[in-house]
Amino acid sequence: MKAVCWEGKKNVRVEEVPDPKILNTQDVILRVTSTAICGSDLHLYNGFVPGMERGDVVGHEFMGEVMEVGPAVRNLKTGDRVVVPFPIACGECAMCRQDLFSVCENSNPNGWMAEKLWGHSPAGIFGYSHLLGGFAGGQAEYVRVPFADVGPIKVPDGMPDEQALFLSDIFPTGYMGADMCNIKPGDVIAVWGAGPVGLFAMASAYLLGAERVIAIDRFPYRLQMARERARVWETINYEEASVLERLNELTGGRGPDACIDAVGMEAHGPTAMYAYDRAKQALMLETDRPIALREAVQACRNGGTVSVIGVYGGFIDKFPMGSLMNRSLTIRTGQCHVQRYMRPLLERIQRGEIDPSFVITHRLRLEDAPRGYDMFLHKRDNCEKVVLTT
Amino acid sequence: MTTATHRTDPGGTSQGLFEDPERVARGLGWFSIGLGLAELGAPRGLARMIGVNDDDDNRNTLFALGLREIASGVAVLARPRSALPMWNRVGGDIMDLALLGRALRADSSERNRVAAATAAVIGVTVLDALTAQKLHAGTRDGADGKPHGGIHVTRAITLTRPREEVYWFWHDFENLPRFMEHLESVRVLDQNRSHWTARAPAGTTVEWDAEITDDRPNELIAWRSLPGADVSNMGSVRFLDAPGGGTEVRVELRYDPPGGKMAAAIAKLFGEEPSLQLSSDLRRFKQVMELGEVVRSDATVTHGPHPARPPELDEIPDAPRAIEQEALEGAIR
Ligand SMILES: NC(=O)c1ccc[n+]([C@@H]2O[C@H](COP(=O)([O-])OP(=O)(O)OC[C@H]3O[C@@H](n4cnc5c(N)ncnc54)[C@H](O)[C@@H]3O)[C@@H](O)[C@H]2O)c1
Ligand SMILES: [Zn+2]
Ligand SMILES: [Zn+2]
């Protein structure tokens, strides 16, 4: 089959690889119909995720049709159309039983690697390094899906791929970002990053009852999408204005009730801090550039919540712990527990409360994935979200 | 999960940050490889980053330094318990400092950036030197940091299954090869005795008979090898109710590699890090108890390293058979 393979920094190629096989009794094999490129894939692409090897098949946002069913699968059969959550979760361990699926204790066969870096291991993830399991990803014609009774959900007849696909990751991720803010009526929420994840965080903040949402980014077309598609109240271009001053103005000096970091470890910035972080990262004295995160902490109102859905890999410098501690802030974070949100969000789509396909700007063939990565990375051609079809 | 590895080390005293110099050494090894790769792959970017002029001279220097960094990183990772590669790193650091010193004086460089890079390298040099010193102290009386006097590992894991079930599963020693990677088979001989076969390097095996030395239902099982074993060893496993439900399993293993050829084979067999082996075994044990089978990924199902892409059928050791068998057992369960 054809699959998108990681071949080193800024180098992905579509290659011919063996077809996936049933390796565990609860596996199914899918024929992938639609898959997407995620901001998390850009961290792999740029070489910031440890534990990648040449030839790894990438991709963790995908859906398709069941072709083959393992002997212990009960809920799915050949021909079912499903969308698959990106964290692999067993459904039986103590974490899964508490709905903390992205920290499943059983789904990372390379847990020892993650334990070395992070103390304990989170769940395995499709196409996301050997550190997180060494599972082949879904930017491919076919993919193996473990724990088929736990993760995948059936897509209702008549719902197009483009409406269902983002249940695999970015819609639940943005939603969890807002969910972790504990939104109450009257709340003002600021979101750093108007990428697809940020847009879903903004839209979800409104779904959860926020009064005003403020979007922060530097690309005018992305801020425009935030205004038009996620209907945010205000936008801030951080290259044109001081974010902290602007936020204080917009919130009567209090600061936003909650701040969402939808940027992650490759944040960019116009300031000297950016040069400092780039240099430290280049010298490998710091793995992540926490520019948006630092700002989110400083900006948040006293007693507010900082919700971190941007992905971080290792260590950061100059974290404003004093601000967090002295002002009683709460920080919440995690890879999304997608399995927890899929059904309720599917229902919201069915009720017409949201149509997730609003983020899509580019539709390409799987073969064109390398072009898609390049375009998405450089935000060329007003690229917001790339969907690949087979 | 918690872990501890103790080696009988009469001379060793640990202190502060360098409690585990081996781990620091490994970290520095990876740091070297990463920095080396950056120097090789993006000498231009790096030159700009640290503030030296991006000319052919400097780029070639960075390329050479990159090769040296990678070589030194690999050396440290290959022998993380040995002080020698670490001292080599210190030598390399001093070379970097000399070069940066030159750059600091050159007119074409950006002083601030070079100064920042210099400060960073000084920091790394100090860390390298301290680690080397600590490793040196720790291995004074052992050749190359090899454990002298046996291996002792403990490791714990928590399962959602009830204590009785976990105890009885372990009690049938013939189940152990399902999750203990290096065990080929265990045959129960009678109520107390069993025969164990373990895989050793180069397709060979080591064997021993073991006897149960203590057995308290739902609480504890202890065993040890009988005289004449290829490798003498003992082990125990404790089962405790976990607070909030489930079972805590605490395993303790002791190996006494005999001298000569066998000692080398055993050291290899149980790896550089016996605690890592036990930890992975217990991870699989948990999977077998909670899910009925060991979780496989495309990269871990094959013997030896494999990229995260579907393996060819002949790369999967007896997978189809294993799946049928486990499906059968699952149905019985
Ligand atoms: N937690 C999860 O489960 C999860 C799931 C999916 C994605 N993610 C992460 O979410 C993040 C965003 O993903 P995406 O797909 O939207 O990526 P993206 O690259 O499209 O979006 C990132 C956006 O952040 C903006 N940005 C950069 N620096 C900034 C700064 N200092 N202030 C404000 N904005 C800044 C960029 O201009 C860009 O528009 C990534 O880190 C990704 O890994 C997390
Ligand atoms: Zn994603
Ligand atoms: Zn689980």
Image (cartoon, rainbow, N blue to C red):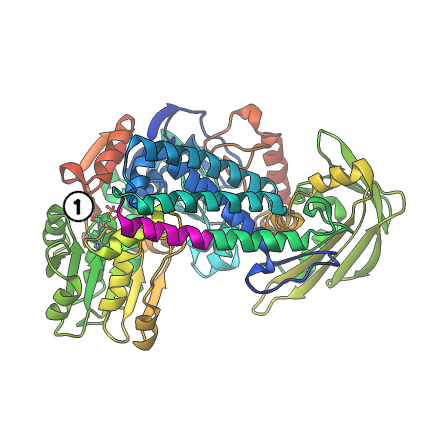
The picture places residue A30, in percent across and down from the top left corner, at 39, 34
Q: Residue sitting at 21 percent across and 47 percent down?
A: A356
Q: Residue furthest right?
A: B227
Q: Position of residue A169 (x, y in %)?
A: 32, 48
Magenta-drawn stretch contains B115: yes
Question: From what the image shows, is residue A230 above or below residue A36?
Answer: below
In this rendering, is residue B101 above or below A36?
Answer: below
Which chain is home to disc 1? A
* For residue B39, side relative to residue A360 (left or right): right
Residue for point 55% across, 56% down: B130
From the top left corner, tell me how far across and down residue B291 is, in percent.
57, 48
The residue labelled by disc 1 is A358
Under mark 1, the amino acid is Phe
Asked if the residue at label 1 sits under 8 Å from ligand 1, the reply is no
Quadrant assignment for the C terminus of chain A: top left
Q: Nearer the viewer, residue B259 or A345?
A: B259
Residue A201 place in picture, x, y as percent: 24, 56
Q: Is residue B106 within the magenta segment?
A: no
Quarter holding residue A304: bottom left
Q: Out of A71 and B159, give the one closest to the viewer.
A: B159
